[in-house]
Image (spheres, helix red, strand yellow):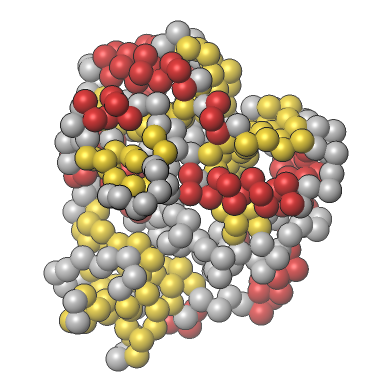
Amino acid sequence: MSTGVALKRTALNAVHRAAGARLVEFGGWEMPVEYSGITQEHLAVRTRAGLFDVSHMGEIDVRGPQAIQLLQHVTSNDVSRLKDFQAQYTALMYPQGSAVDDCLVHRLAEDHYFLCVNAANTDKDFTWIVRNNSFDAVVRDVSAEYSQLAIQGPNSAAVVSKVSDADLASLRYYWFTHATCCGVEGFLARTGYTGEDGFEFYFPPRESERVWTQLLEEGKEEVLTPVGLGARNTLRLEAGYALYGHELDEETTLLEANLGWICKLDKGDFIGRDALAKQRQDGPGKRLVGFEMIDRGIARDGYAVWIEDAAAGHVTSGSPAPFLKKNIGMAYLPPTQAEVGREIQIEIRGRKTAARIVTLPFYKRSR
């Protein structure tokens, strides 16, 4: 696991080690990839509840009289639509219409916002926002001030209700609130990255072990299970969620990544708007699709995709889907060859194996 650079560690690193978690490098951090096994942890989230340490994620604070103008300028979605204590999925934008990063914007007040960004991109995101800040707004990287735990799954509300003073019945999807959890004050958001109902709790790192331990203790009846990054990845893939560095990068526009719904071209000018408007008119150069394997075999990230004996694209994410009991993946293909139902071939260790394009997402929970 040595990279020559000292890895960052969350406040729960020693707890993960004591629990026997397998630790790996991820985005410059030493993180648990699994505790009891990726399949078992994946199924725990789909059927019961799982607890994730996602304290490696970055947090950026934006406040001031023109905070909203700054965020409107650097992100693709329409921040003006947010009400206090509402969150929004969006992207920080490059001029070419691709994403610096995808992130969540939380509105605390008209002049105060809180961004949750990807761990590996935190420094890049912060630098980009500051570089484009010609507004009366103050931008701070406050990542060191927060731990973040995610409680995800159909039993997540039952677990959180035992340890929190929040009114969960009135806390809607993509809203958040000031709340006490396990006696610790923080922000409780009804958000997540698994395709299930769930919550993300932001709070001071010094309280991490207390909150983690009490959640697992109080969640025994709901079979709350520690979950690592391995199952986090298979869960988000089943749910059809993009991962930066896989479905999103500097060369891929939001329209190509099926994220046109977070591109609000009518909100006014923003970084990347002109490129997106032109591509919306002309059509994207490639299209993200989901596929299921027909033949035996697992399509891994980076594998070549063939259509009618011609190289057509590559797999961006691929793995077994433990809940669906299929081998699935996502890939970029030419728009003219990306229709649902088309048979394609994935090159696995030199052998072309059959797959079929299917509708995304692969999994969608019943509400």
Give how far across and how far down residue 348 sits, in percent: 21, 75
Q: Residue at x 56, y 59 (%)?
A: 259
Q: Residue at x 85, y 33 (%)?
A: 65
Vertical position of residue 219 compared to residue 235: above or below:
above
Q: Observer-nearest residue: 249 or 353?
A: 249
The answer to whether 69 appears left or right of 301 in the picture is: right
Q: Residue at x 29, y 13 (%)?
A: 218
Vertical position of residue 326 compared to residue 162: above or below:
below
Q: Observer-nearest residue: 96 or 88?
A: 96
Give how far across and how far down residue 61 sits, in percent: 66, 34
Q: Quadrant of residue 352?
A: bottom left
Give how far across and how far down residue 36 sits, in percent: 17, 36
The answer to whether 145 appears left or right of 340 in the picture is: right
Q: Quadrant of residue 343?
A: bottom left
The answer to whether 30 appears left or right of 77 in the picture is: left
Give how far across and how far down residue 318 sits, in percent: 30, 62
The answer to whether 106 appears left or right of 325 in the picture is: right
Q: Is residue 311 visible?
A: yes
The quadrant of the image that shows the C terminus is top left
Q: Residue furthest bottom?
A: 309
Vertical position of residue 13 compared to residue 194: above or below:
above
Q: Residue furthest front?
A: 4
Vertical position of residue 339 compared to residue 199: above or below:
below
Q: Residue at x 55, y 22 (%)?
A: 187
Count numbered badges in the picture. Answer: 0
Q: Is residue 219 visible?
A: no
